[in-house]
Amino acid sequence: MAGVPATGLFKLYSAFDYINFNVAQEDINFEELVRLNLKNYNWYTNASYDGFLGDITKLTTGISYSNSRNDLLFNTTDISNTEMTFHAKAKIKHSFSNWFKISYGAEYFSKDFSEEGLVEQTVPFIYDFTENIAAAFTETDIFFSNDLAAKVG
C-alpha cells in the first residue's frame, strides 16, 4: 500500500575455508610410501530478505553462490576439480483475509562442474557438466471453516 514502508529482516552470510593435507603412508600393495595430498578451497555466500511490503504482502527471497576447488594427488593419480553453484528464489504472499491467501514465486539453480586429471601420470581425462533448473509456482490457501481448508496450486 502507498505510504506503508517496507519492513523486514536482511541477512548476509559468507564463509571461506582452505585445507592443505599431505600424508605419506605404507601400503601393502606398494613397495614405496603412498602419498596423498589434498588441497581444498571453498567460498560460500548467501543473502536473504524476509519482510512485508505494505499491509498484506510478504516477500521472502534469497540468493547464494559457492565456489569450491579440489586438487588431489594420490600416488600417481592427479585430479583437479572446480564446482560453482548459484541459487536464487523469491516468494510473494498476499494475505487478503484470515480465510484467503495466495502465494507465487520462482526459483533458479545453476551448477557448473569441471574435473580433469592424469591417471598413472599418463592417461588424461576431462569431465564437465553444466546444469540449470528453473521453476515457478502459484498456490492458494482457502479456509472454509476451522475444520476445512484447501491448498490449491
Image (cartoon, rainbow, N blue to C red):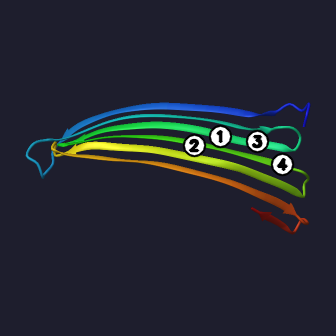
Quarter where residue 26 is shown: top left
Callout 3 touching callout 1 (CB < 8 Å):
no
Seen as rendered, the residue at the extreme bottom is 148
Q: Which residue is mark 1?
A: 62
Q: Earlier in the sequence, mark 3 or mark 4?
A: 3
Q: Amino acid at mark 4?
A: His
Is 120 situated left or right of 135 in this image? Answer: left
Q: Earlier in the sequence, mark 4 or mark 1?
A: 1
The answer to whether 105 is drawn above or below residue 22 in the figure is: below
Residue drawn at (67%, 49%), measured in percent from left and top?
A: 106
Is 2 situated left or right of 18 in this image? Answer: right
Quarter where residue 122 is shown: top left
Query: Which secondary structure, mark 3?
Result: strand
Q: Which residue is mark 3?
A: 59
Q: Could you tell me residue 30's position as x and y percent?
A: 11, 48
Quadrant for the C terminus in the image: bottom right
Number of marks in the rendered image: 4
Q: Which residue is mark 4?
A: 94
Q: CA distance from mark 4 to mark 1?
A: 18 Å
Is 151 situated left or right of 34 in this image? Answer: right
Query: Which secondary structure, mark 4?
Result: strand
Q: Earlier in the sequence, mark 1 or mark 2?
A: 1
Between residue 102 and residue 136, name the one nearer to us. Answer: 136
Q: CA distance from mark 3 to mark 4?
A: 9 Å
Q: CA distance from mark 3 to mark 1?
A: 10 Å
Q: Could you tell me residue 6's position as x and y percent?
A: 82, 33
Between residue 62 and residue 124, name the one nearer to us. Answer: 124
Q: Amino acid at mark 2?
A: His
Q: CA distance from mark 1 to mark 2?
A: 8 Å
Q: Residues within 10 Å of mark 2 (few under 14, many from 20)?
A: some
